Image (spheres, grey):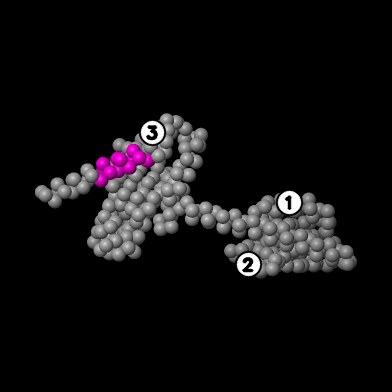
Amino acid sequence: MDSLEELTKCLPPLFSMWPAPYGFAGAIDEKDRSLVKPILHNVHGDFSTGEPFRWEGGQVPDMERLRRDADVRIVLAQLLQNEEETMGYLVSGMHEWSLREQERFEEEAMFLSAALNTVIGNRRLEEANNAILRMAEHDYLTGLYNRRGFLRELERRLKLQENQDQILTLFAMDMDRLKMINDVYGHAEGDTAIQHLANALLAKTEGKGICARYGGDEFAFAMIGDRSYVPEVDIIREGIEKTAREMCGPKEYLIGASLGACSCAVTELQSLDQILAEADYALYADKSRRKGRRREDRER
């Protein structure tokens, strides 16, 4: 188990074997330690769940009801701990005290401590593994996918049944003049410009696309929809540039990009490598065309 919800579902049948007029166990929230999450609540054999609560008003959510319960004359409480931290606590209300009742209560506390420790440890391990996986599949500077993560996520989405009658458009993009920004203004400024371009790319795709930074000034993104986006490539590029410049604010340089695209029906896709190569070819054609246009403008 790696969630308190799963643990909570398993406890009633176990604790029904050790009946008591009242029983409560709470797990302390790791992010807000004044908050308690109920994992066990037993009132005369009636097991229920409840909402998290703050324990300033009492260690159990129904303290006043417990005080009025004629069958509860003795209340035992114990922290649920491992070697490093307090994870929660257990409260048991009974009518008569005996050595066996105390032993049973201590057994319950030991069991819950072990269970909580396992659940918390499993969750933390899963979170650590997810963090490692994210680092392995995402670019550290921009938070976009890297090449590995991009291809993996794209392949996953292409297999979805809902996308089988759709069209894939894959874009290859280079940032313009990054070397100049690095040389003149420093690599820190270059990194900032890259981040603005990445954020503009995310904004333009509105969360519908899969965006990646391959490294350096190279980006890629894919969109799956009911049409090809190739005819809109100039509009998309201009929109990305405009958004990036607005994010960047007044600078002595302008953030620019070259963009190429290729599309095909999802069901007709033979190879991602092939469509990537075609998008790259379109990118370099766009770069050459725009360089030629800038040269003509200077000559005029």
Q: Label 2 crowding class (10 Å Cα cut-off): few <14, some 14-19, many 20+?
A: few
Q: Hey, which residue is sitting farthest left in the picture?
A: 300
Give the extent of the magenta segment: 276-287
Which residue is pictured at 32% across the width and 58% down the height?
193
Q: Which of marks 1 and 2 is nearer the N terminus?
A: 1
Specify whether 174 is left or right of 126. left
For label 1, the SS is: helix
Identify the main secondary structure in magenta.
helix
| Mark 3 residue element | strand
The residue lying at 56 percent from left, 55 percent from top is 129
| Figure quadrant of residue 50 | bottom right
Residue labelled with disc 3: 264
Task: Name the one closer to the observer, 3 or 22.
Answer: 3
Q: How far across and down, in percent of the image, does residue 34 sit?
A: 63, 67
Residue 20 pos. (x, y %): 83, 59
Sequence-earlier tag: 1 or 3 = 1
- Identify which amino acid the numbered label 2 is placed on: Ser
Q: Mark 2 falls on what kind of element?
A: loop
Is residue 65 among the parts visible in the rendering? no
Q: Mark 1 points at which residue?
A: 10
Q: Name the residue under label 2.
A: 34
User: Is 81 rendered above or below residue 146?
Assistant: below
Q: From where the camera sits, is residue 12 visible?
A: yes
